[in-house]
């Protein structure tokens, strides 16, 4: 199938597919005229790549995880599990930072409300 059909079947843009190829996440064969051609397998691969992106993984991390898909083995599975654990830890730390940032913003909003109440009280006196 050509790139447009793959894009339609996988539910992504042609631009995304070109990006995946640039990043080494996806490969195609080329016709004599240079058109990209894919097999049905690539539909599943693109779906998998999309799931990885939806989980917050970067293309570099996805590249590190693909050997588990391309060459399944206990060693590759262990390496993928370790890498996903590292990413989970990174996300957990980021969530904690976001919670702190939200709490700091809540504090500023509370201070602002208190300050507004002082102005309203002074204006009505």
Image: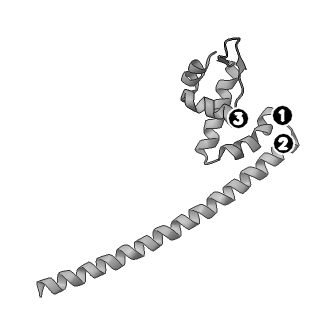
Q: Position of residue 52 (x, y in %)?
A: 64, 42
Q: Position of residue 74 (x, y in %)?
A: 87, 42
Residue at 64% across / 30% down in the picture? 46
Tell me the residue that label 3 is attached to.
25
Give 38 or 33, whichever is nearer the viewer: 33
Label 3, secondary structure: give it: loop
Looking at this view, name the residue that lies furthest to the front: 33
Q: Is residue 111 above or below residue 54?
A: below
Q: Quote the CA–CA distance across marks 1 and 2.
A: 7 Å
Label 2, secondary structure: give it: helix
Residue at 80% across / 38% down in the picture? 67
Tell me the residue that label 1 is attached to.
71
Would residue 109 appear left or right of 20 to someone viewing this image? left
Does residue 11 appear in this view?
no
For marks 1 and 2, the one nearer the N-term is 1
Question: Mark 1: few, some, or many residues within 10 Å (few <14, many ≥20)?
Answer: few
Give 55 or 64, whichever is nearer the viewer: 64
Q: For residue 35, what is the image quadrant?
A: top right
Q: Are marks 1 and 2 in contact (CB under 8 Å)?
A: yes
Q: Position of residue 49 (x, y in %)?
A: 65, 36
Q: Are marks 3 and 2 in contact (CB under 8 Å)?
A: no
Tell me the residue that label 2 is attached to.
76
Q: For residue 24, what is the image quadrant?
A: top right
Rendered-image quadrant of the N terminus: top right
Question: Mark 3: few, some, or many residues within 10 Å (few <14, many ≥20)?
Answer: some
For marks 1 and 3, the one nearer the N-term is 3
Would residue 120 appear left or right of 88 to someone viewing this image? left
Mark 3 or 2, closer to the camera: 3
Looking at this view, name the residue that lies furthest to the top: 32
Would residue 25 appear left or right of 108 to someone viewing this image? right
Question: Mark 2: few, some, or many residues within 10 Å (few <14, many ≥20)?
Answer: some
Q: Is residue 8 above or below residue 67?
A: above
């Amino acid at each position: 199938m050509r790139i447009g059909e793959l894009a339609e079947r996988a539910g992504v843009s042609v631009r995304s597919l070109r990006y995946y190829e640039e990043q080494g996440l996806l490969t195609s064969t080329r016709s004599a005229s240079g058109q990209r051609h894919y097999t049905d397998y690539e539909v599943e691969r693109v779906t998998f790549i999309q799931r990885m992106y939806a989980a917050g993984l970067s293309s570099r991390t996805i590249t590190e995880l693909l050997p588990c898909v391309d060459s399944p083995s206990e060693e590759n599975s262990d390496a993928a599990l370790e890498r996903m654990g590292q990413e989970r830890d990174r996300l957990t730390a980021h969530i904690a930072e976001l919670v702190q940032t939200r709490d700091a913003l809540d504090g500023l909003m509370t201070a602002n409300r208190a300050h507004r109440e002082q102005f309203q009280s002074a204006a009505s006196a």
